[in-house]
Image (cartoon, helix red, strand yellow):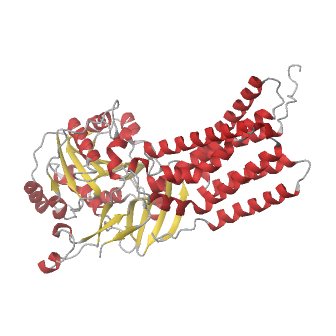
Amino acid sequence: MSLGQPSKYRPTKPEVAVFVSGVTSMGLEILAGRIIAPQFGSSIYTWGSIITVFLAALSLGYWQGGRQAETASNRRMTWILLGTAAYVGIVVYGSDQLLLSASMMPLPTRYASLPAVLILFGPPTYLLGFISPYSAELSQKTGIGEASGHVYALGTIGSIVGAGVTTYLLIPTLGIDMIGLLFGLVLVATAFALTLPTLSPRPAVASVVIALLLVVAAGVGPVTFDHRGDVVYQTQTAYQELEVIDNGDVRTLYLDGARHSAMDLDDPDRHVFEYTRYFHIPMLMVDDPEEVENVLFIGGGGYTGPKDFERKYNASVDVVELDPAVTRAAKEYFRLEESKNLTTQTEDGRVFLQNTDEKYDLIVLDAYQKDQVPIHLTQLGFMELAENHLTQDGVFLANVIAAPSGTGSEFYRAQYKTIDEAFGSTYSFRTSNWDSVQNIEVVATKDETNFTEAELAERNERRDLGIDLNDEVDAYMDEPATDDVPVLTEDHAPVDSLQASTVGQKYVIEQTEGEQKAEPASSVAASPYPATLARTAPTFEIPGSPGLNSTLP
């Protein structure tokens, strides 16, 4: 072939099949993270389960396919691809119910996601493993080494395409069901192409039937009933699944199945979740709240905190939110309006601090989830970076999700120890008197201070902040024991291990009932939860079912 001539290479049918199997297997692996995360989180254990199952299933498929390679034919590959497409339809239609069933298995938390991944993705990945040895057997290459190398290269190229397209194009653009539908239809189309030019009736009919079943599965959606309320908006962003759900008068933002922010549609200024009230505790620790001029929130969510600070204080509020879709949803559904006093930046919080010279009077870190914590925002280097960007009277607050003591408290105690290493003094406040996993507010001052609960209570009485923090101050906790937990550093930050004991525990989110007048002592005493939190109703997230919750009467 002379230079400049177009290539005459035309892939054979087996080569097309192995390329498509690579695209689909890697695409499904990337998609698995999105399907599994709302139920089990996206910790290292979840991703370890996904990678282990996919590699094991592919290996088993390669082995079985190699043993049966002498019977390989385009017709056999057609049925394998159709069988895989049919199972993808099951994943699209029944994933939620299968996830819920798998989550009920009595397994240690580290392995909780393994059965779900195995049931959902083991069979189709196993079937795709047959394609490579079959293609090598049918290859037109003369030598075994050349044939196998050619097949490996095509399969790997397909995997690269599948990973890239799924990550950068499909997930940010389409929902999970539509992506599953697309993969299923690609498999059906490839299977159908393998029968051409001779159109075999049975494979042709099966292709049409499976294609229709895929469309129906994607159109009908999951079979489980959503107990959370009416879905107002749902999308797959580049980082997570985002949902806006209305339950009565309360609108809630869910990220990967976990509640992040809520707004009372009838009273938008009300703190629906108790923990957002604690963001104001640093205003009791500064010398003069009126001198707080610059505030930074790392993590936006529904922007409850930033909006509240803009309303209550004469301060400039900067918000750094990594996911632009979260900010768009806040503007569309949670009444966020940017102004000269409230601005948003789409950037990673650590990168933002590394690139800015701005000093802040208060920095609020609100970027953690129960099962998903950005590790680089937990480490000592980040805490020192935040401390360096505070004014001399500055205060730092981290919204940590863990148990306050005992089993499930390891991450909180390690985070407290890390923050205390970087700042002058450190304090913590529980948001519920239940011993379950909850939001714990860790507050640190740049200077060394020695605030007592009594002194903070006195400041709360004396200062007009526009919010009464008496109950929040009452939640003041003693310094935790930290001898058995590490300082989280860039070299060693075992956040997943520290959080492992919280996975199976109930996550309590105290939910307010509005600003009420003081109730008679008898009424408070009758409350099923502590008097200091009597005006709130704790909401529990059921382990393994982040979309389901229950509120005590």
Image coords of residue 517 (percent x, y): 19, 77
Towards the viewer: 66 or 264 = 66
Towards the viewer: 179 or 276 = 179
Above-or-below relation of 209 to 158: below
44 horizontally vs 199: left or right: left
- Which quadrant does the N terminus fall into? top right
Residue 158 in view = yes
State the residue at coordinates (31%, 60%): 308
Location of residue 313 (image quadrant): bottom left
Image coords of residue 112 (percent x, y): 43, 52
State the residue at coordinates (31%, 62%): 509
Location of residue 413 (image quadrant): top left
Above-or-below relation of 2 to 462: above
Image coords of residue 230 (percent x, y): 50, 71
State the residue at coordinates (54%, 60%): 98
Image coords of residue 203 (percent x, y): 82, 55
144 horizontally vs 540: left or right: right
Q: Return the residue found at the far top.
A: 2
143 horizontally vs 183: left or right: right
- Total labels: the figure holds 0
Residue 297 in view = no
- Which quadrant does the C terminus fall into? bottom left
